[in-house]
Amino acid sequence: MTRKSDIALELLAPARDYRHGKTAIDSGADAVYIGAPAFGARAAASASLDEIAGLCRYAHIFGARVHVAMNTLLYDDELKRAESMAHELWDAGADALIIQDMAFAMMNLPPIELHASTQTAALTPDRVRFLEKAGFSRVILERGLSLEEIKSIRAATSVDLECFVHGAICVCHSGQCYMSHIVSGRSGNRGECSQPCRSTFDLTDDKGDVIERGRHLLSVADLSLDDNLGELIDTGITSFKIEGRLKDESYVKNSVVHLSRRLDKAISQRHGYIRSSYGRTRADFDPDPTRTFSRGFTDYYLHDTANKVATMSTAKATGRLIGSVATVGGSFFTLRGTPEKLTPGDGLCIVTPDGNVTGAGVNRYDSGKIYVRSLDGITPGASVYRNFDKAFIDRLKAVVPSRTLPVAIKVSFLGDKLTAYAETVGTRITLEQEASYPEADNSERAETVFSTQMRKSGGSVFEITDISVEGTVPFMPVSAINALRRDLLDMLLKERTACYRRPAGIPLTPVAGGDKADYRFNVVNAWSRRFYELCGFTDIEQGVELRDDFIGIEAMRTRYCIRRELGMCIKESGRGGKLYLENNGNRFALDFDCTHCMMSVTYAGRYKEARTGESATEKPRREDLRPNKTEQDRHRHKTARRR
């Protein structure tokens, strides 16, 4: 039994397009987030207005919500288009916009909820309080926060809080990572991150000596807080977010079904909480997130900054650990222990004790012997992971999750009139029609046939769970009973759609903020500059995307610490001295705030400049020297500003 005072909790899932979004809802998501046709922080996961409108219509049947991401930084000539798109998305049925750029505060927007993207760097109580006072309905928290920090934010604010609980982790503070733009001209804040954090780096000291060579020093495992949902509920989180708008449909099914069941379990152990959407989900498989894409899982720094979270050997999916190599034969190898049964077509990731990584596909599995095409890199003692589980993926592809709403139907036969009532969660309709049917020779059989046919709601979003009949059922042809059922459910669906109400958001307004807004405030257009001016800021720097010189720019700040991961923590008697990351001719200086266990990565220029102290005039080498839209945009807008 639910009460009006119950707190509604939301499982929020990624939707690359309509199909992925529908799959997420059918798998148990209470809401989905999807990229707008433009201005989303995953440019490769944009959806059309028609897809978004269709997804809204479907989601709203179950009381599920659709949040649309428009969380990139906007250039001046994009402001009006973004404003217009916000209205188009409202007309399409969107429940909320996820945004980063404060230019939206200067726009004439529809009454839609605005959610502060994790790109707004929601790290502290002061920052979240500022966003709440500005008018955001929800704030999406930074992934690297500890449970105690979340508690501090909750104690200082009343705004709705959203928290990532599953999927890939941005190693840096979201929205304040500029490494991609520096090395490739592709700005993460513009939706085109080239993911340099997943690249290999050399770690050097101030003498130029190489400490680590060619390792994925900034790559971290994926997030999994499924064991911590109860703690997060108790802390005040109301939306639990799954990362993955670029992931495939199997990942969506698997992660949503898994997290939905875990959230239901956490709710069942507490009083005063309900799910924010309705309906019964059926998914005929046992979910296991280790069997779809993952780099291994971590709870990151939710409880302890001493966690080892790096995946330095590879940034690719490693998957599920299934054992270690015992012996290597002429064309096969064996594993220690009793491994899971492997299937031809399985993909394996093998990591040797010294960190070398190789991949292999299973050709045959026979009596514990694993036959692969090549044994190169496979040595005794190497850890073996299965990163493609063919049997599990085949099973996932065959499963079509479904979601239905329970419907109670009552039909009254009085005289020559038939009155039918249908009721589901929060919706009730009445249908009346003439009932000029002859009296049945066998009234008991007539009622049985009537009830049996009325229950056949397969293929619809409704499940007839209760039927009652008042009066005597006449002789009705099966076709007439089916037509009655269809008309009744069609009316119920239309009413269900029509009665859905979106909570109204409030316009953003400037609030007192501070004096200086440095480049990390990401001001790249006139409207966001005006917003901060109205907030009282007098010293407002231009954003990194409008700059030519990146020397001294903090490319990222993170709780992740390379020293700690490599056993070089100064607090634990590790050696001091300056450290650098080097990749593709670019050099980044590492600075460590050991008091707060934080690391910053600052651009120090090209190798020669950084090591000799020569004038830093050469631009960073781009990983892709061909012109790209982001680079062209940056120069175009700077030219416009000079005019």
Image (cartoon, rainbow, N blue to C red):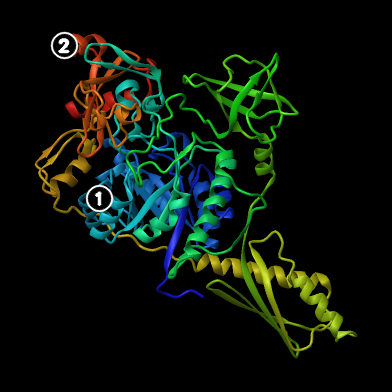
Circle 1: element type: helix
Q: Nearer the viewer, residue 641 or 529?
A: 529
Q: Nearer the viewer, residue 374 or 485?
A: 374
Q: Quadrant of the C terminus?
A: top left
Residue furthest right in the image: 441
Circle 2: element type: loop
Q: Is residue 431 above or below residue 395?
A: below
Q: Position of residue 374 (x, y in %)?
A: 65, 15
Q: Decide if residue 596 is on the left or right side of residue 476.
A: left
Q: Decide if residue 509 is on the left or right side of residue 426.
A: left
Q: Nearer the viewer, residue 470 or 558?
A: 558
Residue for badge 1:
105
Mark positioned earlier in the residue sequence (2 or 1): 1
In the rendered structure, find residue 439 and report the number of the disc placed on it.
Answer: none
Q: Position of residue 334 (x, y in %)?
A: 66, 24
Q: CA distance from mark 2 to mark 1?
A: 43 Å
In the rendered structure, find residue 613 and report the number of the disc placed on it.
Answer: 2
**Which residue appears at 25% of the width and 36% of the height?**
598
**Which residue appears at 72% of the width and 73% of the height?**
484
Q: Decide if residue 439 is on the left or right side of residue 16.
A: right
Q: In the rendered image, is residue 523 in sight?
A: no
Q: Position of residue 575 (x, y in %)?
A: 24, 23
